[in-house]
Amino acid sequence: MFKIEDIMTKDVITVNKETTIQEAIRIIVKNNITGLPVVNNKMQLVGILSEKDVLSLLYNLGTRTGRVEEFMTRAVVSFDIEDSLVDVCDCLVKHNFRRVPIVAGPKKKLVGIITRKNIVQRISECQNFFRDTPHKKDEHVDVKVPV
């Protein structure tokens, strides 16, 4: 079975809570991503800014300063790098999340992110592997070993 570490994106694009919402939106659009982990100066996860969070811009922006901390989700579901990939998949399905941050160590330092796309790409790679094998389901393959 694959490990979280095998599938996660390691070079995570992040922002801090003081980043302007305009800059965060620019980063999301430029990098074609659906959300950004929000970290402190020690790379510890403090929130996440999703496309859904950004939609709240339509409501009463005039009373806000326009910093990421005013829009981000603070109660972030994350997984430890040692957790099960099956648990990550269950979470993505049950909670309809597009991504989950991956943390490590007692300080919960951000080390990666897993998106639905990461998992779908890995499934696709596995399908190609099985498709390209010389046998089909329930077909016996004789393997000749040189003597």
Image: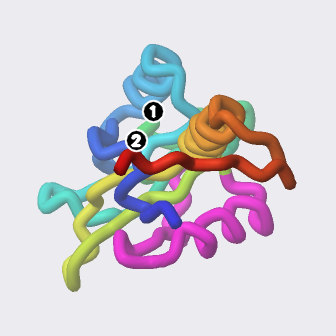
Residue 94, image x and y in percent? 79, 68
Determine the residue located farthest toward the right in the rendered image: 138
Residue 111, image x and y in percent? 27, 57
Residue that numbered label 2 is attached to? 67
Q: Secondary structure at mark 2?
A: loop
Callout 2–callout 1 Cβ contact below 8 Å: yes
Q: Is residue 50 visible?
A: no
* Magenta span contains residue 82: yes
Q: Residues within 10 Å of mark 1 (few under 14, many from 20)?
A: many
The span shown in magenta is 71-97
- The chosen color scheme is rainbow
* Magenta span contains residue 32: no
Query: Which residue is at 77% across, 57% downward?
Result: 96
Residue that numbered label 1 is attached to? 21
Q: 69 left or right of 17?
A: right
Q: Residues within 10 Å of mark 2 (few under 14, many from 20)?
A: some
Q: Secondary structure at mark 1?
A: helix
Query: Which residue is at 14% across, 56% downward?
Result: 41
Q: Is residue 129 visible?
A: yes
